[in-house]
Amino acid sequence: MGKIMSGIYEAVKQAEGIQGGMRFAMLTGVTGQMAAEKPDTPDMVKKMAAAYKEITSKDCPSSLLGGMA
């Protein structure tokens, strides 16, 4: 469960550090733990991809999206 969402969350943390991860959680309402436990849904993946872009100023890599967004 949550393989795509966990991947996006980890990519943000890797790119922007702990503060980026915290901001990501605030924007999405999903913590790293929740991302791993919740099922990947198209709506949540789109929301997380948008948060990725807002935080990193880059489009979320398609390799992380698993064809969902």
Image: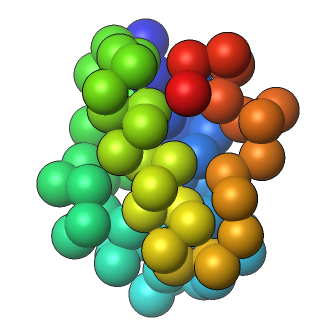
Q: Residue furthest bottom?
A: 19
* Residue 16 in picture, x, y percent from top left: 63, 82
Q: Is residue 33 visible?
A: no
Q: Is residue 52 visible?
A: yes
- Left of 36 or right of it: where is 9? right
Give the residue displayed 44% in from the left and 32% down from the top. Answer: 45
Quadrant of the image for the N terminus?
Answer: top left
Quarter location, residue 41: top left
- Left of 4 or right of it: where is 11? right
- Left of 30 or right of it: where is 63? right
Looking at the picture, tell me which residue is in the foreground, 11 or 37: 11
- Left of 68 or right of it: where is 29? left
Give the residue displayed 43% in from the left and 62% down from the top. Answer: 51
Give the residue displayed 77% in from the left and 46% down from the top. Answer: 61
Quadrant of the image for the C terminus?
Answer: top right
* Residue 40 in picture, x, y percent from top left: 40, 18
* Residue 7 in picture, x, y percent from top left: 62, 39
Quarter location, residue 57: bottom right
* In the depicted structure, whether residue 63 falls above or below residue 31: above
Question: Looking at the image, how many numbered discs can be counted on the residues?
Answer: 0
Give the residue displayed 51% in from the left and 48% down from the top. Answer: 49
* In the depicted structure, whether residue 61 falls above or below residue 55: above
Quarter location, residue 37: top left
Looking at the picture, tell me which residue is in the foreground, 57 or 29: 57
* In the depicted structure, whether residue 27 falls above or below residue 31: below
Looking at the picture, tell me which residue is in the foreground, 66 or 18: 66
Q: Colour scheme used in the picture?
A: rainbow
* Residue 48 in picture, x, y percent from top left: 42, 48
Looking at the picture, tell me which residue is in the foreground, 44 or 7: 44
